[in-house]
Amino acid sequence: MRSKIVNTKFTSRTSWRAKLEKQQEPKIVDVPPRMQRQWGEGKMLIPCPRDVDALVREVPRGRLVTVNQIRARLASEYGADCTCPMVTGIFLRIAAETAEEDREAGKSCVTPYWRVLRGGGRLNEKYPGGVVAQARQLKGEGHEVKWIGKGCAVIDFEQRLVSW
């Protein structure tokens, strides 16, 4: 009996660019009850993909930003108490995939998603190419990246964070 090889890579009929540019407005909602223990009561921003992408584009070469900084800046800009962490993560992934789609199409100016770090300076395994690709990009910009436990992190990342 012959084995059949199945491609398990996620594919979508909608391009990442279309997902990024989808007409969508940010919304301010009450912090859901199940999230109040962590985020408190108040107002939560549900951002739009273009806003997340625009903030990542502001990070200059050699500098870094954390997801929490992006969330705090978005909340501040819209007068909310916090920004939805799940939606922000999804939109960061869309911005990253769009950047790679653009790069494959020959564009040289793409959203520098690799400059966005998780808490503690950790790299994001969900970005295109995983932590190995993100580490390669960061090393190319002069950052020191080190394997710590099961993940990867930028050494002394705090010194290179943007100040918004």
Image (spheres, rainbow, N blue to C red):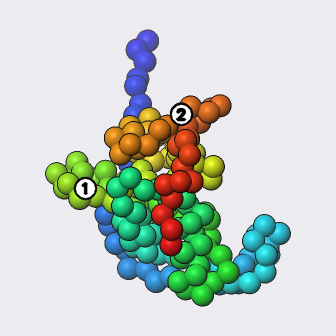
Q: Is residue 113 above or below residue 4?
A: below
Q: CA distance from mark 2 to mark 1?
A: 28 Å
Q: Quadrant of residue 54?
A: bottom left
Q: Residue furthest top?
A: 1
User: Residue 161's x, y, as percent?
Assistant: 51, 59
Give the residue at mark 2.
146
**Of helix, strand and loop, which one carries label 1?**
helix
- First along the sequence among labels 2 and 1: 1
Residues under numbered marks 2 and 1 in contact, where contact means CB atoms less than 8 Å apart: no
The quarter of the picture where the N terminus appears is: top left
Q: Is residue 70 left or right of residue 13?
A: right
Q: Can residue 146 be seen by looking at this rendering? A: yes
| Residue drawn at 47 percent across, 38 percent down | 144
Name the residue carrying label 1.
102
**Residue at image x 56%, y 31%?**
147
Secondary element at tag 2: strand
Give 58 or 101, whichever is nearer the viewer.
Answer: 58
Q: Say left or right for 27 vs 110.
A: right
Left or right of 109: which side holds 14?
right
Callout 1: few (<14), some (14-19), or many (20+) C-alpha neighbours within 10 Å? some
Indicate the position of residue 4 as horizontal and vertical percent values: 41, 23
**Location of residue 153 in the rendering, given as x and y in whole percent from the top left corner:** 56, 41
Q: Nearer the viewer, mark 2 or mark 1?
A: 2
Q: Which amino acid is tagged 2?
A: Lys
The residue type indicated by label 1 comes to Asp
> Residue 56 falls in which quadrant of the image?
bottom left
Q: Which mark is residue 3?
A: none
